[in-house]
Image (cartoon, rainbow, N blue to C red):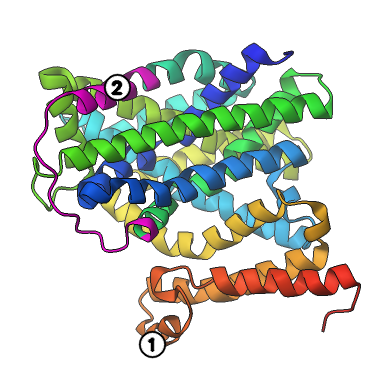
Amino acid sequence: MIFKKETLVTSFALFSMFFGAGNLILPPLLGFQAGNDWILVTLGFGISAVLLPLLGIIAHARLQGTLMDFSKKISPYFGLIYGIVVYLICIALPAPRTASVTHEMAIQPFFDVSSLLTSVIYFSLVFVFALNRSKVLDLLGQFLTPLILLILLTIIGIAIVQPHPEMISPVIKTPVVTGLLEGYQTFDAVAAMVVGGVLIVSIHMNHQGTYHEKKKLVTQSGILAGIALLLIYAGFIYTGAVFNSSFPENSSRTALLAGISTETLGSIGNAFLSVLVALACFTTAIGIVTGTADFVKGLAGNSQTAYVLTALLSSLLGVIMGQFDVQYIIAVAVPALMLVYPVTILLIVLNVIPNKFASSIVFKSVVVVAILFSLLDFGLSIGIQQLQVLQEAIPFGVSGLGWVLPSFLTFVVANYFALRKVPSV
């Protein structure tokens, strides 16, 4: 196979760009709250944090363009606006969150330094890596990811084999839905759009293969990365479940992860966890800043100056936003996710299914309906309680999935008219 070695390196790089702060701190608490229902929670989490990102990478393999190509059947203006919104969200929320988690879990327990100093050093290094973007895949895939995986598998492996107390009853009433919505917080479907773009640009820069060779490389790498993500998520959810009687019920995400590390690795656990947190967060931040800079560079006529300035400004924004604690950044992220995630999911799905069922009218109709119903969830997430009655009247609305059924019905109706070549009203 022509890309055999490159497939492994590329899949490692993809894994490291996906696996950041949220991916590390969210699964243990899910398992902690789910107890014996950890498998159901894993199912929901796997749909939004593994399957959808994998489909996003497969869509990138098919398109081999930029994020704007995902919505080219709607309008170039929509693609531009959507791209700007997605990249602004990424550099304003998940990227700074990686710095906040790194400070809280990897720096603060050992060094009496301010979060500002941590963020400045952290994003200075991110900026340096972004300037060497031609080497990003190799640096992540060959060096950083193997170390991340080694520490993760060690923690999970010890948790599985060592004796543990009996699990207490779950506190989650709808485990699949809860896991699904918690998977939103990883930003992985949105991240698939961003890091998939980084991957495509890197491959175009470093390889002269045909379209089909590149498609095969990206697809196989995405599948391998997805399998690795699912195994790690399931392992950490299970680890949280088996320790759910060992820690206080109100344990925070970071405190629980730190406690599990100590339980599995002993006194050296915190040191290993610090390395893991720093590496996992750092690789994700590199992917976000590099992807944002690639996007602006493309808009500016392939200008390297635009690339450098964007990477610099993204790093500076990361320093500023990184001064907020993890819980605050997660809370701020919720409204943005409620607005952007449904559209992102549908753009991914529509770009994976056969073109026969994804005509321009289907794209436009489905996305418009999704936006309208997402505005309802967005309004509620920012405190407009008057919308609650309307939300309760929509199927799956109370679960934050009110857009699903209307979007599906629109997809069916739009395809009915498109395939019969009957003008839609």
Residue at coordinates 52% horizontally, 65% vertically from top-left?
339
Question: Could you say which quadrant of the image residue 120 lies in?
Answer: top left
Question: Could you say which quadrant of the image residue 3 lies in?
Answer: top right
Q: Position of residue 293 (x, y in %)?
A: 62, 38
- Name the residue beneath numbered marker 1: 386
As for residue 129 lying within the magenta part, the answer is: no
How many numbered callouts? Answer: 2
Give the crowd class for mark 1: few <14, some 14-19, many >=20 residues within 10 Å: few
Give the crowd class for mark 2: few <14, some 14-19, many >=20 residues within 10 Å: some
Q: Residue furthest right?
A: 421
- Name the residue beneath numbered marker 2: 275
Residue at coordinates 12% horizontally, 49% vertically from top-left?
168
Q: Which residues are magenta?
A: 149-177
Q: Amino acid at mark 2?
A: Val
- The answer to whether 184 appears left or right of 326 in the picture is right
Q: Position of residue 158 (x, y in %)?
A: 21, 22
Q: Amino acid at mark 1?
A: Gln
- The answer to whether 415 appears left or right of 91 in the picture is right
Residue at coordinates 15% horizontally, 30% vertically from top-left?
109
Label 2 sits on a secondary structure element that is helix
Label 1 sits on a secondary structure element that is helix
Q: Position of residue 157 (x, y in %)?
A: 27, 23
- The answer to whether 7 appears left or right of 332 in the picture is right
Q: Position of residue 65 (x, y in %)?
A: 76, 40
CA gap, disc 2 to disc 1? 46 Å
As for residue 169 lying within the magenta part, the answer is: yes
Q: Which mark is residue 361?
A: none
